[in-house]
Amino acid sequence: MEPIEVATIEDFQPILDKGEPFLMFKHSLTCPISSAAYTEYQAYIKENPDVPTYYLTVQESRPLSNYIADTFSVKHESPQVLFFKNGEVVWHTSHWNITEKAIREVVSNG
């Protein structure tokens, strides 16, 4: 299952309101580190198709990216993966720390 793109706060809010665990990937279209991290994210998704996964492109969805950073007191980074549970960010990491293994460990223990 491919991650679903979320572009606006209005798109994001219903996902958050469900209260179900999900992953969000903040992706930069111009960063090679982000490209490598997205490959790791997709490797996790391929092996765990039941986990809801979303992404935003920071160049195109800056208001949503800033909203997430401000609302959840998580410094904006790109690339960045956030794990939401019960409407809160319970884990996040960025750059080279984004690995299939790291995501798997957090979600399976989450």
Image: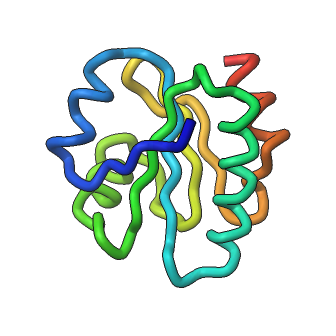
Q: Is residue 4 above or below residue 28?
A: above
Q: Is residue 64 above or below residue 72?
A: below
Residue drawn at the location 53% of the way across and 43% of the way down: 2
Residue 53 is left or right of residue 94, and the answer is left
Placement of the N terminus among the 4 image quadrants: top right
- Name the residue furthest right: 101
Residue 63 quadrant: bottom left
The image quadrant of residue 36 is bottom right
The quarter in which the C terminus is drawn is top right
Left or right of 1? Residue 108 is right
Which residue appears at 30% of the width and 71% of the height?
60
Total number of numbered discs in the rendering: 0
Return the x and y of residue 58 as percentages of the image width and height.
39, 68
Classify 90 as above or below 92. Answer: above
Rendered residue at 73%/39% (across/down): 44
**Residue 27: horizontal and vertical position, in percent?**
51, 64
Kindly give the residue lying farthest to the front in the view shown.
Answer: 1
Q: Residue furthest bottom?
A: 30
Please, is residue 14 above or below residue 99 in the view?
above
Q: Nearer the viewer, residue 35 or 2?
A: 2
- 39 and 65: which is toward the camera: 39
Give the image location of residue 95, x and y in percent: 69, 65
Residue in view at x 37 percent, y 23 percent: 87
Q: Nearer the viewer, residue 41 or 70?
A: 41
- Expressed as whole percent of the image width and height from the top left, the position of residue 82 reads 54, 42
- Judging from the image, the colouring scheme is rainbow
